[in-house]
């Protein structure tokens, strides 16, 4: 029998699957390590194979320590993370939607240079802005308040750019003209006609802003010193630092890290169909 020769396209598909499979393993391996080691105690963590379970399981003990340590401060950190990320996502989405609409649908003096200047701020390292932000928050007497974390985080030049792209592709000028002929004003066009058409962009900007704020570590480290105002990222880091001089609780910290990932996973799974479609529309227009 003659062997059927594989076409180049089929070989390419198998190669692509192999590469993507290796990349998936590379990305998921740290999550597997976290999942496995949250079941261990400290001796097991250092004496057993890191990518497989050990017996007996200490998950319930670790959960009890996580949620009761320091009078249950982890619950406070979890709540703070939701507050910081939630407010940041909502305010950022509103600001970017308004700004993107203005840059997309209106002409005014200096529009091009101003937009270029805003985009140019993306290239400024965030670490270079920490000291000015700290001094500004100190001047406004906002240090050790939630607003010292939220206000600097709602400025998102890339989100503004994304929303401009979505407005360009999602709301045709002809539709705006037809709405004006029917008597619709600026706010009616924006709120009732435009926003439903760029829903994918709103979800994309909001979700990315939520993730960025949820993972934020350096800014809270600088502007917040009260333990009860820490987000999870900063709180778990403090526990990790303390563990070097006291009884180690590394498995508890690992468990807390896994719990901190769950809201992000749920968010992406729930809103994935919106932001994926939004990214696709933006990429076609861009």
Image: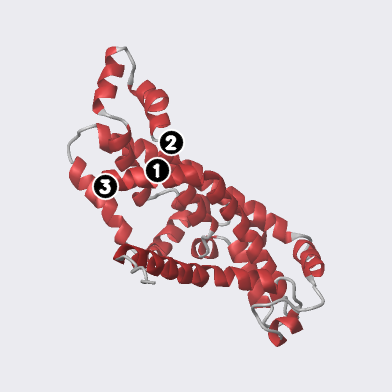
The residue under label 3 is 286
Mark 1 and mark 2 in contact (Cβ < 8 Å)? yes
Which numbered disc covers residue 278?
Answer: 1
| Relative side of 63 to 116, left or right | right
Question: Which of these two is toward me, 150 or 195?
Answer: 195
Counting the numbered discs, the total is 3
- Residue 247 against residue 152 in the figure, above or below: below
Q: Residue furthest front?
A: 1
- Residue 279 against residue 4 in the figure, above or below: above
The residue under label 2 is 199
Q: Can residue 20 be seen in this view?
A: yes
Q: Where is residue 180 in the image (x, y as percent from the top left)?
A: 28, 17
| Relative side of 201 to 269, left or right | left
Q: Position of residue 239 (x, y in %)?
A: 67, 72
* Quarter of the view holding residue 53: bottom right
Question: Between marks 2 and 3, how big is the CA–CA gap?
Answer: 17 Å
Secondary structure found at label 2 = helix
Secondary structure found at label 1 = helix
Q: Which residue lies furthest to the top in this view?
A: 182
Question: Between marks 3 and 1, how big is the CA–CA gap?
Answer: 12 Å
- The residue located at (47%, 54%) in the rendering is 137
Question: Between marks 2 and 1, how big is the CA–CA gap?
Answer: 8 Å
């Amino acid at each position: 029998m003659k062997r059927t020769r594989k076409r180049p396209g089929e070989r390419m598909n198998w190669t692509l699957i192999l590469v993507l499979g290796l990349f998936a393993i590379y990305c998921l391996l740290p999550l597997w390590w976290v999942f496995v080691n949250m079941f261990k105690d400290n001796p097991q963590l250092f004496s057993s194979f890191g990518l497989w379970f050990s017996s007996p399981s200490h998950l319930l003990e670790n959960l009890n320590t996580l949620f009761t340590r320091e009078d249950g401060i982890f619950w406070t950190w979890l709540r703070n993370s939701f507050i910081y990320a939630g407010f940041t996502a909502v305010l950022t989405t509103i600001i970017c939607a308004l700004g993107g609409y203005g840059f997309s649908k209106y002409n005014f003096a200096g529009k091009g240079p101003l937009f270029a200047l805003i985009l140019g701020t993306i290239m400024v390292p965030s670490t270079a802005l920490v000291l000015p932000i700290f001094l500004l928050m100190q001047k406004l007497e906002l240090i050790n308040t939630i607003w010292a974390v939220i206000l600097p985080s709602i400025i998102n030049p890339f989100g503004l750019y994304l929303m401009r792209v979505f407005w360009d592709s999602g709301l045709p000028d002809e539709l705006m003209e037809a709405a004006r002929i029917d008597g619709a004003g600026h706010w009616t066009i924006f709120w009732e006609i435009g926003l439903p058409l760029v829903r994918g962009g709103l979800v994309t900007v909001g979700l990315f802003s939520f993730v960025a704020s949820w993972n934020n570590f350096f800014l809270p480290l600088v502007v917040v010193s009260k333990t009860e105002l820490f987000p999870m990222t900063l709180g778990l880091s403090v526990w990790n630092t303390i563990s070097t001089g006291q009884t180690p609780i590394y498995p508890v910290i690992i468990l807390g890290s896994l719990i901190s990932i769950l809201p992000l996973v749920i968010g992406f799974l729930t809103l994935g169909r919106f932001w994926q479609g939004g990214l696709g529309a933006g990429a076609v227009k861009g």
